[in-house]
Every structure is written in structure tokens, then in C-alpha cells.
Amino acid sequence: MFKKKIGLLFLTGFLCLAGVPIGPEVMAMLEIQGLLAYALPDKEHTALDRVYGYAGEDVKTTIQKYISENFVQNFWGSPDILDYRFTNEALLGLFFDDNFTHIDMIAASMGFMYNGAVAEKAEVLTGGQTLFVPTDSGWDFWRWHVDGPLYKWADFDEVARPGDPLISQDGSVVYTTFETEMSRIRDLAQALYCGPTNLVEWYFPVRKMVDMMAAITDYGAASYGLNCLYPSKVPDLPQIAFVGGEGLLGSTDDVIPGANHMDPMFISANTTGFKPNPVIGPLLDFVENNLN
């Protein structure tokens, strides 16, 4: 049983380093949210209202960190996620977008939240990153609880233009820039629920590294799902790597500027007039050169 779970344990270890207790319930929640964001992107999200009371502590702890502006809010759990109003798409953006998520391994550059106030999160919750959090839950000292604004999502090609960044009204805070937005949130939403479960477990480079390590050991047998026939040839397999300049590996010699960890999979492929896709051309060349 331990051998079969090697990939999940590897991923969980990385995410726990980020201060987030990721378990199967959290992963299932992300898939459900992907389906809702794809099918009903502009509809106000209500699913959490019905199930949050039954959710495990890892779900609540993970979500609370997302919507806490500072340590006090995170510690006391107030306001919580149910105090805010989001469209299905905006809630998905809160979980995955690089301007909001503190989990680098799932970050993508998909746009920005709008229609409600946001603020910079305290550094103690971000590990030194510049991240933002919605702040208008609809109540304050004088109004204990009223309906706040419905937070919506502006896609990657709707938030900034070259030389014209998205900034706060007083000009003191830069939210995002044209150069650092590139992936369509709808594509990520679809990938979350279509195909084999689970995107955050299988479809990024950590999964590949785990499989390659397993393939050259006894875990490469068919009984473990890999069925590797020539383990000695695994190190010689052709490979191509696309590294996000703002991703986990940081700055290297071969990067996509402004991209995060998930962006190489989701950089928009049909808006090349707006922003060229740096992945498709090299990927097609790689396939053509390694067919034989």
C-alpha cells in the first residue's frame, strides 16, 4: 500500500512545507470547483454553503489561509469563506491564480479578481511573496453582517496591456502586469475535471520525477501501474522542459518570463495575436525530431 502511494506522499510533503495540510478531500474539492467554474463561470458560488459544515479540518484550514489578510484572521478563522460572495470562476481564481495562492506548485497566471476590494496579505502568510486577498465580506464594526459585493474574475487578456499595468486607484500598488498574465482560467477549469483524476497530483513535473524514480526500481512493475519494460533506458528518454520564470525553480537559463508552475500547460494557444505562445512551437519541434 505504501508503494502505491509514493506519488501522493511526495506531493503531500511538498505542500505541507507550504504550511497547507493537503489531503484527498481538498483535491476532490478542487475538481468540483473546476467543474462549476467551467459550466457556470458567472454564477454566484453556493456549493460551499451547503457542504462546508461537513468538511474536514484540512479543507477549512487550507481555505482559511486563502481568505485571511493577516495572522489574527487566520488564527481566529474570521471572517471565513462563507462571509464572502464569489462567482464560481472567481473562487477558482482565488485558489489557483499566482496573485492569490500561496501554494507555488499549483499557481497559474490567469488574470485578477474584480468588483470588490482587495488588499495585500501579511508577509507572515505568504512566505515573502506579494499576494492579495479579498477584504469586503459585507460587514464592519457598525454593520455586523450584510451582503458584500459579488467578486468576479477578469481573464488574463482583460486585466492589463503592454506598458499599462493594473494598479490601485491611488497608484501605490501594482496588482499585475501584461507580461505576467498568460493562461485562460477556463482552460484550467476544464482540465481539473476532464480526464483522469487528479490534476494537482498527476499533471506537473513532480509526477514525472516520481514516475522516473519508480520506473528504475521494483516499483516499475505492471502491478504498480507503470509496467516499465526497459528501466535502464529511462535516463536516456528524450525530454523537453518549460520552466516558469516565477515558478518553483525560479530564474534559470531557459525560462518563460512571467510564467508560474502551471502556466506551461495552460498558456493560451488561440490568442497568439495578443501574446505569442512560447510552448507550442518548441513542443511540436520536439515531437517531430523524436518520432523515430
Image (tube, grey):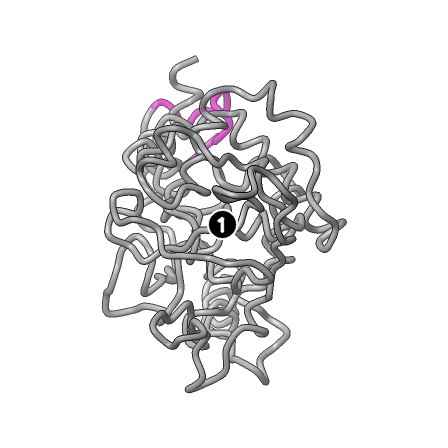
Q: Residue at x 23, y 65 (%)?
A: 252
In the image, residue 32 above or below residue 119? above
Badge count: 1
Can you give x and y, in whole percent of width and height, for residue 39 in the image?
76, 49
Frontmost residue, 195 versus 52 = 52
Can you give x and y, in whole percent of width and height, for residue 217 in the image?
32, 27
Q: Which residue is mark 1?
A: 96
Mark 1 surroundings within 10 Å by alpha-carbon count, few (fewer than 14), some (14 through 19), many (20 or more): many
Q: Residue at x 60, y 60 (%)?
A: 153
Secondary structure under badge 1? helix
Frontmost residue, 165 versus 83 = 83
Residue 234's image quarter? top left
Residue type at mark 1: give it: Phe
In the image, residue 236 above or below residue 159? above
Can you give x and y, in whole percent of width and height, for residue 107 in the image?
43, 52
Q: Residue at x 58, y 48 (%)?
A: 92
The residue segment tinted magenta is 218-229
Q: Is residue 232 in view?
A: yes
Residue 4's image quarter? top left
Q: Residue at x 32, y 58 (%)?
A: 130
Q: Residue furthest top?
A: 1
